[in-house]
Image (cartoon, grey):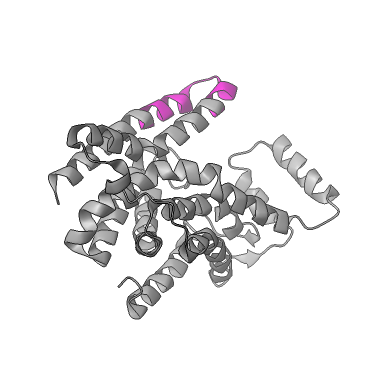
Amino acid sequence: MSKRSLYFIILTFSISLFLGGIFRFLNVSENLKLNMSLKVFVGVLYMFCPFFSVLILEKFSYESIKDKCGINFNLNFWYLIALLLPLFFSFASSGVATVLPNVEISYDMEGFFERLSKTANPQQISKMRQQLENLPFNPLLFWIIGALISSLTVNAVAAFGEEIGWRGYLFNELFYKYGFWKSSFIIGFIWGLWHIPLIIQGHNYPSYPFLGVIWMIIFCILYSPIFSLIRIKAGSVLATSILHGAINATYGFSILFLKGGNELLVGMLGVSGFIVLLIVDIIIWLSKWEL
């Protein structure tokens, strides 16, 4: 691994640990209303840690970010693939989850509200139930449209803060030296480790914060070849930003109609999601799409 790669990793993790400490302080502070707004702000800022590192390294290397990180605006078919894949994966994950023990389809969203009770108060959940019951139509299509719009806009912008580092700077440093699969594994592993300061505080896996660290690393490793493929085929880190934004925007669909299980089993971040990603990775390997 090159010195520039190590500098990037050390710098990114240092900034992330600092922001993770702030996040921890907000978790134990008493002003809940203020903390929620600040936690959202710090969470978004956390996503830009790789971006900050790239900016700092650029000042010392005198290299153009645009050239170094693969930024171009030549749209192609792979941008559409990047947008729609996570939605497909989420629904596929739901289907896989139904074969797991004590997991079943729940079209009334009872399982979803049970999971929501871990992060929302009863009044908020009751209000959401009432709003859904009063709708004269099935809102699923509108939720999907809204998620896709978010994927292309605010989510993609936030995800760009990460992607310019992972699939931009680091990909450029590792891909030509290690090849597709090895570089994808290394980037995925580092990407997973980078989440630790938030995961151990209950982010993504609130009931299993420490085991959740391992699960997040597995998730990132399994998704990494798909990111690398999009990065190569689209020729731009902007496409992987859309992919990343779509993952965040469509995750809820992977648990929306499921009852039973837990965050380690169901959802894209659970075993059902891992199975879907592993199948796709095998397809990429067999088809040699990365070539």
Horizontal relation, residue 124 to residue 45: left or right: right
Q: Residue 199 location in percent, x, y?
A: 41, 43
* Residue 109 in which image quadrant: bottom right
Query: Which residues fall within the magenta stretch?
Result: 20-36
On screen, residue 286 above or below 249: below
Q: Residue 248 location in percent, x, y?
A: 51, 50
Residue lying at the far bottom in this picture: please name it.
286
The total of numbered circles placed on residues is: 0
Residue at image point 45% right, 45% down: 159
Q: Residue 17 location in percent, x, y?
A: 31, 33
On screen, residue 55 above or below 170: above
- Give the main secondary structure of the magenta stretch: helix
Nearest the eye: 149 or 24: 149
Residue lying at the far front in this picture: please name it.
74
On screen, residue 260 above or below 211: below
On screen, residue 180 above or below 213: below
